[in-house]
Amino acid sequence: MNRQSRVFILLLIFFIVVSAVKGQTSLGLNAGYINPFPILNYNSTSYVSGSADYNGSFFVATTYRKKAGGKLFLGASLHFHHYQLDYIEKNAIHIGLDEYTKDIDYTFNYLNLVLYPELVFGHRLTYYVNAGITAGLLLNANKSGTNTHMRMHSGGPDGYYPVYTVTEVEGDARSDIKSFSAGVHIGTGLRYHISDSWDINFDLSGQYILFPVEIEFTGSQVDLLISAGAEYTIHRKKNKPGQ
């Protein structure tokens, strides 16, 4: 077990222990859309270019909140993130004469743990803000696409002519993707109390995380998460004097 896995497991154990503490607690389930904004870590030149375009990425999250007093709650959530990425990288030894193009579709899943304090304002319709940390482990990853080498050769009827060598790429992509990510989380949203025990919510949050694709080529990313869900509050009865 590597160091990153141990860190994640320790955080998960902490989440389970905190969940077992007595007091008013709320358990919820959210599902929504991820809009990632990748940040490439190379200096763009005429010889190197790239793009990372996401589509169809989504997440499902279980949430836990415990009232710590007044408007303050302690929260934790366990996220399943599904990413689909179209990745293109072009690298030229001599522009127009000797070029490599990588065009690969990635599909991969992460398990993320988020820990945060939360401030809640209002009564029946409440507004909340939270901020904390996030850590994630790669569950699996696959890729499919092509690596193309274009090279100009001389000797054709019109002089130079291009020769293309295309290599199919398919299979496991864990060697291309970071197995561990960590970063910061900030969120806000509205929660409406349907009854004493049930709430519905609309949540908007952002996460700055280490970029999970193309270890050597890309740097980090910002994920915008938009979701809706429901929450159930457990009201523990207080013991009467003498009991």
Image (spheres, grey):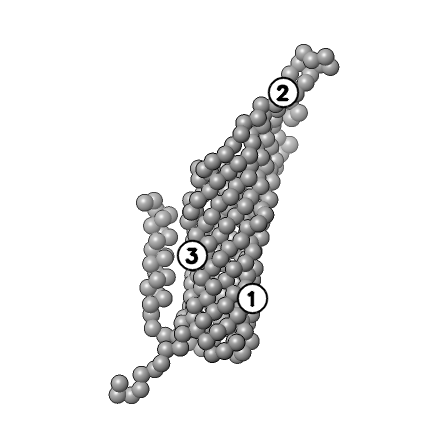
Q: Which residue is found at the position 55% from the left and 39% from the top?
A: 105
Q: Amino acid at mark 1?
A: Phe
Query: Comparing marks 3 and 2, which lies closer to the viewer?
Result: 2
Q: Secondary structure at mark 3?
A: strand
Q: Pick the quarter of the image with the C terminus.
A: bottom left
Q: Residues within 10 Å of mark 1 (few under 14, many from 20)?
A: some
Foreground pick, 221 / 63:
63
The answer to whether 123 appears left or right of 155 in the picture is left
Residue 36 percent across, percent down from the top left: 56, 50
N-term mark: 3 or 2? 3
The answer to whether 22 appears left or right of 71 in the picture is left
Residue 201 percent across, percent down from the top left: 54, 68
What residue is disc 3 on? 113
N-term mark: 1 or 2? 2
Q: Residues within 10 Å of mark 2 (few under 14, many from 20)?
A: few
What residue is disc 1 on? 202
Q: Amino acid at mark 2?
A: Val
